[in-house]
Image (tube, helix red, strand yellow):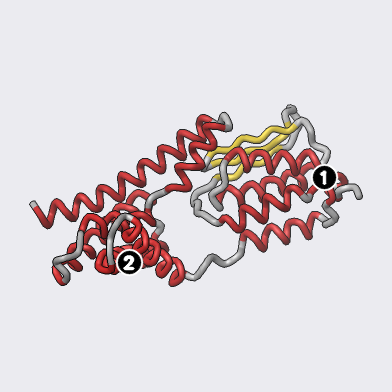
């Protein structure tokens, strides 16, 4: 069965491709995956003189001709949603046998775009639990687990409360590091036998941008040097933010 993309206009195919790429990039996908997905959709729509360019903050796609149409999207916020990445990636591989109209396709993509995120209370709870178990993995016991759990939980709750004001990622991670450290220090006042270093390290683990750094390395390996540099640099910058928050609290309390 021939794909319905072949009967769509170039502008419609480009709009489908750009929307799919936007969902992927906002959800934390690698830039080479975003470009590959958009090109695959356009090729199924009969557009073979097409080029795409993607960075962590910008998507561009268009024909390589003077009269060709092109579209661009500026990304201002990014997160991590592996479910959306998997769904859109699978959708792009179904394009050779796609049987939906332009309106139905855009409605499917709109549903994914407008899908409600997980409740904040779930992120807060699971972040605290992850911090506690990281402390145990690093060699801590029950006290270290409890301190790291509270530190991660309080820090995530604070950042979620500030999310309507859209603080930058650097300041969000800096505040998170400070709250984790302050929580662990206060916990040690109550339980002096607790190893503070293990609790702080465990509580900070959920804030380390492991996926961003991994995607940066994968972009390097795929030849996307600009995107790889941006992602790796952002990841290092966020790690520095966590360290600055922890060091600030320790400096104030123990100077």
| Left or right placement of residue 191 versus residue 37 in this view | left
Coordinates of residue 8 in the picture (x, y in percent): 84, 47
From this view, report whether residue 182 is shown above or below residue 72: below
**For residue 120, what is the image quadrant?**
bottom left
| Left or right placement of residue 16 versus residue 205 in this view | right
- Name the residue located 91 percent from the left edge and 50 percent from the top edge: 1
The residue tagged with tag 2: helix, strand or loop? Answer: helix
Q: Residues within 10 Å of mark 1 (few under 14, many from 20)?
A: few
**For residue 162, what is the image quadrant?**
bottom left
**For residue 249, what is the image quadrant?**
bottom left
User: On residue 53, which mark appears?
Assistant: none
- Name the residue located 61 percent from the left edge and 38 percent from the top edge: 32
From this view, report whether residue 70 is shown above or below residue 22: above
Coordinates of residue 145 in the picture (x, y in percent): 30, 66
- Name the residue located 39 percent from the left edge and 56 percent from the top edge: 206
- Name the residue located 51 percent from the left edge and 35 percent from the top edge: 227
| Left or right placement of residue 3 versus residue 245 in this view | right
In the image shown, does 107 or 177 lie closer to the viewer?
177
User: On residue 149, which mark appears?
Assistant: 2
From this view, report whether residue 231 is shown above or below residue 27: above
Q: CA distance from mark 1 to mark 2?
A: 54 Å
Coordinates of residue 126 in the picture (x, y in percent): 43, 66
From this view, report whether residue 46 is shown above or below residue 80: above
Q: Which residue is mark 1?
A: 9
């Amino acid at each position: 069965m021939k794909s319905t993309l072949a009967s769509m206009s170039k502008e419609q195919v480009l709009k489908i491709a750009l929307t799919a790429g936007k969902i992927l990039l906002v959800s934390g996908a690698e830039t080479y995956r975003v470009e590959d997905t958009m090109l695959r959709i356009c090729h199924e729509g009969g557009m073979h003189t097409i080029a795409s360019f993607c960075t962590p903050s910008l998507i561009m796609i268009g024909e390589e001709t003077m009269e060709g149409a092109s579209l661009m999207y500026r990304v201002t916020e990014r997160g991590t949603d592996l479910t959306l990445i998997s769904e859109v990636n699978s959708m792009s591989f179904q394009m050779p046998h796609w049987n939906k109209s332009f309106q139905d396709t855009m409605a499917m993509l709109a549903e994914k775009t407008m899908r409600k995120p997980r409740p904040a209370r779930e992120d807060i709870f699971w972040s605290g639990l992850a911090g506690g178990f990281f402390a145990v993995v690093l060699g801590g016991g029950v006290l270290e687990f409890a301190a790291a759990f509270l530190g991660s939980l309080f820090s995530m709750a604070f950042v979620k409360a500030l999310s309507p004001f859209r603080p930058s990622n650097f300041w969000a991670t800096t505040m998170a590091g400070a709250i984790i450290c302050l929580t662990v220090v206060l916990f040690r006042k109550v339980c002096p036998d607790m190893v503070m270093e293990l609790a702080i390290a465990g509580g900070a683990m959920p804030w380390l941008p492991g996926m961003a750094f991994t995607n940066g390395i994968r972009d390097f390996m795929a030849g996307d040097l600009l995107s790889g540099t941006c992602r790796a640099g952002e990841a290092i910058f966020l790690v520095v933010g966590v360290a600055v928050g922890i060091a600030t609290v320790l400096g104030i309390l123990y100077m």
